[in-house]
Image (spheres, coloured by chain):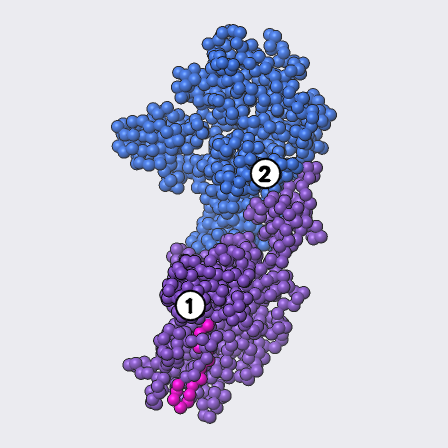
Chain colours: A purple, B blue
Amino acid sequence: MTKVSFKPAGKTIDAAPGTELLEAARKAGIEIEAPCGGKGSCGGCVVRILSGKVDSENTGTLSPSAVSRGFVLACKTKILDEPVTVDIPEQMGKEGGQFIDETKDTCLVDSDLLPKKEQLEPLISKILLQVPDPQLEDGLSDLDRLTRAVQQDRDKKEVAFPLPVIRQAAEALRKDNGKVTVSLTDTPTHYHITGIEPGDRSSRNFGIAVDVGTTTVAVQLVSLPDAKVIATRTAYNEQVDCGLDVISRINYARKPERLQELRSRVLKTINGLIEQLCAGNEVEVGDINNAVIAGNTTMTHLLLGLPPEHIRLEPYTPTILEAPFLTAAEVGIEIDPQAWIYISPAVGSYVGGDISAGLLCTGIAAGTDEVNLFIDIGTNGELVIGNCDFLLTCACSAGPAFEGGGIDFGMRAALGAVEKVEIDPGTGAASYRTIGGVKAKGICGTGMISLLAGLFVSGWLDAAGKLNRGKASPAIRIEGRQARYVVVPAAESASGKEITIGETDIENIIRAKAAVYSATALMLDQVGLSFDDLSNIYIAGGFGRFLDIEKSVIIGLLPDLPREKYRYIGNSSLMGAYMVLVSRRYRQRQLELARRMTYMELSTDPAYMNQYTGALFLPHTDMSLFPSVKKQKLD
Amino acid sequence: MTKVSFKPAGKTIDAAPGTELLEAARKAGIEIEAPCGGKGSCGGCVVRILSGKVDSENTGTLSPSAVSRGFVLACKTKILDEPVTVDIPEQMGKEGGQFIDETKDTCLVDSDLLPKKEQLEPLISKILLQVPDPQLEDGLSDLDRLTRAVQQDRDKKEVAFPLPVIRQAAEALRKDNGKVTVSLTDTPTHYHITGIEPGDRSSRNFGIAVDVGTTTVAVQLVSLPDAKVIATRTAYNEQVDCGLDVISRINYARKPERLQELRSRVLKTINGLIEQLCAGNEVEVGDINNAVIAGNTTMTHLLLGLPPEHIRLEPYTPTILEAPFLTAAEVGIEIDPQAWIYISPAVGSYVGGDISAGLLCTGIAAGTDEVNLFIDIGTNGELVIGNCDFLLTCACSAGPAFEGGGIDFGMRAALGAVEKVEIDPGTGAASYRTIGGVKAKGICGTGMISLLAGLFVSGWLDAAGKLNRGKASPAIRIEGRQARYVVVPAAESASGKEITIGETDIENIIRAKAAVYSATALMLDQVGLSFDDLSNIYIAGGFGRFLDIEKSVIIGLLPDLPREKYRYIGNSSLMGAYMVLVSRRYRQRQLELARRMTYMELSTDPAYMNQYTGALFLPHTDMSLFPSVKKQKLD
């Protein structure tokens, strides 16, 4: 038998030589999803060998550079007779070890909002050039000839080259008889050349869309010539160890070395995701030439190493709303060092580039005159209301509960997360479904909503968020003044320990939903509109793969409106970043939207506290606002 | 007694505690010039303490950062009772330890060629701004307010900020109530902000002009608001250990790690000179916001890390002639990392930015219609002939002899260099003068010309470069088939060993002068002009503080023309770089000159070898070309 250790789970098992790694992992209680069923064709089960030799077959899914860095397909790798240590790439904090291939997610955004084929134009294109040979007579330098070749059949704009590209020019121009591929971006005054490679590499142009959330980071790898999404991966933002919300991060960042630490942590998260995406999809990191990053204003400041202090202090002034184009090397993103990074523009200190990106996924971006509401529920909640004539925005602090933060068994929407719960009205016991159908590891946002709505409607939870002590249920346990509800019994969970939710957790969830609801109500109030004036309500957030609108209304997260007005659009920040990545026209549209938005400060409005306090019940103190819920309770 | 060690000379002496460092150095045979006579007011005797404590008084000449890095004034520093190691900054290769303050050099260029007061405009200016306080109402970011403050009273161009400046913005804007100094450069499309500092720092704007020669590097520190030269320092290019001329450097650079080595070596030379200049002149390196670098095409390529191979291979194509603006951080120059570096534009592989800079020091730049000839004699010789209507240029390989390279006791023009020699016709013995009047250390270019002319005219050297073996002289020593001439007896030299010149050295000098003369003659020939058509001849080079035209004609370096046609303009590359540094108009003028020049390839012309062979005599095989020399010989 051979010792096989798994990181970061910290588990070690004994396996017979010849055992498949996928099987060894399962034996250790670690689920690795193998979407293609172990045929080695999907790259979904990519893991990394940290030490020790294995017998691994590369079916062509892994790039040579990925293989050289130790990545293997778990389904095509066998244990030999020496100890090995295996890293299961996606690290999920205390949960450790799971991962989920999100490429198969359905696009939740209306297809007529997506860039059309003729609108596809990434920031940096790869262009094949034939550069004439050098001549003694004309006295032209390599760069002179390259410049002329770029200008041929184009405008006579100046051509700008960064030093690292100049360094490669002489060799690149001579390696394939003057046939070179340049990475080119076209600005109003210049053609900027960000890369030069010998031969025809024009099809190897990749980009990444990045959503940097306070709790969760998502990276999407995109093939730029055809705007095809290759894969998406998410991970917890490694900054979570330094504070759960933006205010605690800002406080943490007060010392320069701590600002540096936060910057390094989020870079580590992003770069780790990029590495996994590339390793599993035959893409070299150096072929990624574009990146669009969307995040709230604090996340953007921390990523760029900008002191965020004044975001927190009156008059809440960020250093930047619109960042210049930056190179990957400057920002610290490990792709082509000369790649251009576009930071999604912010509106204010509390309405960031995630919102201007998300708005691209709504009818507002299409220029409708119907009044639409866009709600993005993350650790911070942001709202935008408007149409082609007006755009107002505000923010509220929801907290990280819906992404699993601050909840004992909370987790983000990943393999093993409880995403749906049904309650037996008689016994109060739960039946549940996990993402991927594997053993449960925790509860994600949609699971929490589903759970609370089920408990409330069946009478096992009261409007104040207290579990029913009056009726005995095997699922409810009284621990002193606190009660706790068992969602998953010990025998059924991945860890072998039960998964529960306590009254303190429930309180956190109620606070989160109250913040969102009260901000929505107050904002409408302030612009003199009622809920009925809304034509469409777009909900975005990291709850899970879907959002059950019915249950969200039951707990009072969303107002009790006709369900057909609602659209759940998933991670709209990432989706918007994708649109901006593949289309310059969408970048322009986003910038115009960001500049049109007017920011309203809610927290200084005395009416806010009233609204909020009223919403700290399930679904609300004023049940007349939730007629459909009242009806269900009575049924 | 305390041990005092001197680097890089490698000498150690014993000194009594309380001894002045200046005196201790003298005791070790190391001359440190103290131009102010030890009053601590000129900063000329700055040295660096590498280890050990000393009792040092700072008279205010040294900046706090220089003091913190161990720089002291040797005249104001006393030895204590612990061993110390002292670095005498300027390193002169095998000579080690001397240095010379070149601030007092007279400007050799016609004053009407220098930028007028109204033409002074450096690339980057420092501008004081009053930025309004942030307001909750307007929703402007720090950068928005800064942008508006820049645009106020200026064009509404876009304002661009690099990331490191953005990082400093929040603090800088709040430290002195919105009063900030920005470093600003104005391009046709943008205002680029390269720095931001709280308070009024507008007078602290410095620049450096750099001449990167194959053998010698010169750096000049300039106060930009008034275009005042603060000081100049020179050192051997540390690349000399990797080859004496450009061709051997190009060969050395063929492996990437060797290209890196050459780049590091020249950067070390430049950065060392900058550090010394700043230390001695109360300037912080971070206050240097501009740099202009002139050098031949190979030197520029090596400095920027560009493979120079194709400069040497047909059809002699460099990667760049005109470099983009680069930041100091990219290039590796240790000044303000965001400072802009302008590389003087080249004409071809063998006529570089040193020549386009040097041309600014001639009447050609002033647009004269008289035909002028410009000869820059360095390791490579370059010639330009022309006026406002035409400009032709060519190059020849002179070798490093006139800068001291490849000559046994050769050295560059620095303290202790023999710069003038007179020969006693009777005994053949030399009397000489050294730079600074100190003990002799070697012979510089002007010394060699003076020596050869004197020996030739007095009959101690024949036209073929052989010393007179027929007459006994105490100064001539026969060593086998070689003869050797003693310039400085052992007792009079700094090292205690005699300083001599051998027949091989003389051959090298003759080859150098023949290359220059023959190129001049052939070029005129090719354009159908004669020497008499020339109105002015500008001679530039690193011979020394002056060039004796008379003696240069005697050895046949320069044609035998009326002496009033000659102008020695010293290091015109450095002077031209200075002009470009302080005036954007001169930068434009230089670019136009560089683009107007037509490069002629001499080496492929069969007539060149004839011309060259004819010139391999003193002064020439055809004495009719040198009537005045013939007359002197006869006298």
Measuring from the top left, give residue A201's x and y in whole percent.
Answer: 62, 54
Please state the extent of the stretch shown in magenta in the rendering. A415-429
Q: Label 1 neighbourhood size at 10 Å, few (<14), some (14-19), many (20+)? A: many
Q: Name the chain under label 1.
A: A
Measuring from the top left, give residue A291's x and y in whole percent.
Answer: 55, 60
Residue located at (65% from left, 36% from top):
B314
- Is disc 2 placed on a helix, strand or loop? helix
Residue A611: which quarter of the image? bottom left
Q: Please name whichever residue, B591 or A415, is drawn nearer the observer in this view of the structure.
A: A415
Q: Does residue B450 sit above or below A150 in this rendering? A: above
Q: Please name whichever residue, B36 or B385, is drawn nearer the observer in this view of the structure.
A: B385
Q: Name the chain under label 2.
A: B
Between tags 2 and 1, which lies in front? 1
Asked whether residue B433 appears in the rendered view, the answer is no
What residue is disc 1 on? A24
Is A423 one of the magenta-colored residues? yes
Q: Does residue A593 sit above or below B98 in this rendering? A: below
What residue is disc 2 on? B309
Q: Please name whichever residue, B265 or B539, is drawn nearer the observer in this view of the structure.
A: B265
Q: Label 2 neighbourhood size at 10 Å, few (<14), some (14-19), many (20+)? A: many
Residue located at (59% from left, 38% from top):
B309
Measured in 3D between alpha carbons, the distance from the residue under mark 2 to the one under mark 1, in whole angstroms, is: 55 Å
Horizontal relation, residue A104 to residue B315: left or right? left
Horizontal relation, residue B492 to residue A347: left or right? left
Q: Are marks 2 and 1 on the same chain?
A: no
Q: Which amino acid, by three-letter code, is at mark 2? A: Glu
Measuring from the top left, give residue A50's x and y in whole percent.
Answer: 42, 59
Residue located at (48% from left, 85% from top):
A625
